[in-house]
Image (cartoon, rainbow, N blue to C red):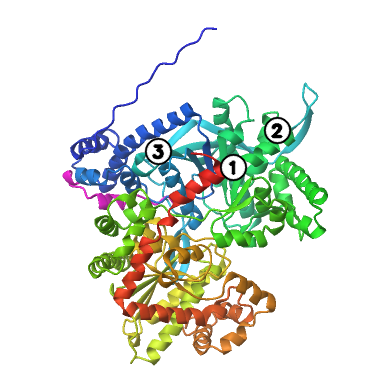
Amino acid sequence: MNTVSKPIIPSPAPRSSKPEILAEEIIERLTYRIGKDAKVAKPHDWLTATILVVRDRIIDKWMASTREVYATGAKRVYYLSLEFLIGRLMRDAVSNLGLMEEVRDALASLGVDVNVIAGLEPDAALGNGGLGRLAACFMESMATVDVPAYGYGIRYVHGLFRQQMADGWQVELPENWLAHGNPWEFERRESSYEIGFGGAVEFVTTHDDQPRYVWKPAERVIAAAFDTPAVGWRGKRVNTLRLWSAQPIDPILLDAFNAGDHIGALRESNKAESLTRVLYPADATPAGQELRLRQEFFFSSASLQDILRRHLQQYDDFTSLPDKVAIQLNDTHPAVSVAELVRLLCDVHGMDFDQAWEITRHTFSYTNHTLLPEALESWAVPLFERLLPRHMQIIYAINAKILIDARKGKNFSDGEIRSISLIDESGDRRVRMGNLAFVGSHSINGVSALHTDLMKVTVFADLHKLYPDRINNKTNGITPRRWLQQCNPGLTGLIREAIGDEFLDDAEKLRALDVHSSDPAFQQKFAAIKRANKVALSNLVASRMGVKLDPSAMFDIQIKRIHEYKRQLLNIIEAVALYDQIRSHPELDWVPRVKLFAGKAAPSYYNAKLIIKLINDVSRTINNDPSVRGLLKIVFVPNYNVSLAEVMVPAADLSEQISTAGMEASGTGNMKFGLNGALTIGTLDGANVEMRDNVGEDNIVIFGLKADEVSKVRSDGHNPRAIIEGSRELAQALAAISSGVFSPDDRNRYTALIDGIYSHDWFMVAADFDAYAQAQREVDQIWTNQSAWYTKTINNTARMGWFSSDRTIRQYADEIWRAG
């Protein structure tokens, strides 16, 4: 056999990082890639030119990382997530490459301020909150700890909505992060796949008399790949974030267009593009629910086809798939991947069902992020069957296998069978995606110790009984590069001065900072950095909202998705009670406090949007009341995103982590605040439990019912009215809100919201109010002794290293993926 040897392509010579060379390259990109003379270039031109120069250096490392994986046959990790809240990338990439000073000097020599142009980069609005930000931190950490990985998601054109306020109400507007292109991404035309919907399934017999099923979709779209490099710390490895964009097979129906139906001629384009237009389309309507399911299948199928194609490029068949591929499902959104992989292995690649099922189960692992039943997705069987008829057959086949084994092998009762079934029959039949992800994975992990323990006795109790070795814990983490080094350079510099540079490579080395926590000189420097961060936030609030803040006041911050279980409502009710006390007792030495809120409410979540309106109504009253004398201010900062968090987190004195115990899976905001030297006030929920264990009970303020106590109160029959009537401050605050004191234009605006606390108080706002108010006064007492305050907050920074996402990823790699 004649063979043609492939030419040896030499690697490019290392690029110089000298500022003068970088400056020359920036001018070259500005001239030849953007077409601008430096004399007329605008800030956004300088931004793009700088990104292109940095990107070239990333590409060298990116290609080297890819070649190494092919050469060594290393196992690859594929992280499937509907969200990747990556934020701005330039500062992240430049910092991780170790080029921040060089790039700053190069731009300065050209008369350009790096901070100005970096602030122009749009936030990639590809996530809603913690789930998406966790995925972004994990991508950075996988590259940092040298795990070969791909992230797979959707290239949303608009992503999550841009939030504006209209008379205190949330208004959703499109977020146009792609309006002027994305210089970080690369289109991969060769990586395009057909994705089908609807149609019918035909039964055929192959030449070897084996039965086969052929799905013939009624609709098809193209999934086109766009790759963004994910750079690890010090540029050790560069992994790939591959996002899918939907494109029509026939972009225009020429016959219809020529016949005068100019709008109808574009219907295929519009239908395809709607798939990747918006993150989380409102699912209050059947059309919205269908679009959500289409999105989830679209990106899952494209990702799996891509994974199998890459595997076959390197290996002979799929029997080695679990040894060379680990697929992590980030929550239930990609759970349909379980059925899709079985379909691809059986229907496309000719494998029998039992073998395909075993390979599937050993390849997938699933991260559960919630115990809320409504967040464990389920789909109406008629919708699922109409949209994905072959997958419905496969799910019934998987279900039969599971239920027969449970009944005959484990002697499960009827109730237990109903609980583990992939089909919920308590009402109209629905496909349970959480159960599908569970049975189709060899590992199911929670994201904090408490959450994992609760999984075993609540949502997955009977599945845990059936498969007792599958559930394990992997407590979430955050990347210290973005959430300390980049967002808080002042504190990073102080830490380096005090303990050296080892913590830059190993966050747990921060523990050496403990010995400085009571040092008055160090406390003074720490306090000066905190004040500078508070001044920066104050300037942002003044410029955006026209509200003047006093940086010497305590900055009390709650930033997260607006949801009743996260209890922004508890926070604002306590603020009303504090307002009443300040007015009633002006002779007392009240601690000046600024309460800052930020977060978005789902468009169809009325109560969450009403809570935003309440915060704004209360703030208008309190901030304009001269009797308060500036001792209390309330601010809701609109359009919360990664960039806003990077300003708010370093400025926080007090971090509000006050979710109803047992309902927050983990939290990562709590970790970011603690790392940046904020004191936490919180319930024993999610990762707060492990934070308390790490930072010490003296360095965190815990209040309220525990998870088991919440369950007992609910089961015993909660009587919130009696609690309210026994708490003067709570009763008066609720009466003021309910009667329209803060809503004179609509006295009944909050009546139903407050009635919900009186009638059922599901989220334990009344039950925890007095404990929360007492804990806030404890915080006041600590604040009055600034030395004690800074001892505690410095200890928080020193002891948060364990919550690095590097630690989390190493645990995934060692204990679940067997990779890296």
Q: Is residue 668 visible?
A: yes
- Secondary structure at badge 3 equals loop
Residue 780 location in percent, x, y?
A: 37, 80
Q: Earlier in the sequence, mark 3 or mark 2?
A: 3
Q: CA distance from mark 3 to mark 2?
A: 35 Å
Q: Say whether marks 3 and 2 touch (CB < 8 Å).
A: no
Label of residue 188 in the image:
none
Give the residue at mark 1.
Answer: 300
Kind of residue indicated by mark 3: Arg
Q: Is residue 321 left or right of residue 789?
A: right
Of marks 3 and 1, the one in the foreground: 3
Q: Nearer the viewer, residue 289 or 576?
A: 576
Residue 388 location in percent, x, y?
A: 69, 43
Kind of residue indicated by mark 1: Ser
Q: Earlier in the sequence, mark 2 or mark 1?
A: 1
Q: Against 792, is 103 above or below? A: above
Which quadrant of the figure contains the N terminus? top right
Residue 604 location in percent, x, y?
A: 57, 63
| In magenta segment, residue 460 | no
Give the residue at mark 3.
Answer: 237
Residue at 51% in and 55% down: 131
- Secondary structure at badge 1 equals helix
Give the residue at mark 2.
Answer: 346
Q: Is residue 785 left or right of residue 443?
A: left
Q: CA distance from mark 2 to mark 1?
A: 17 Å
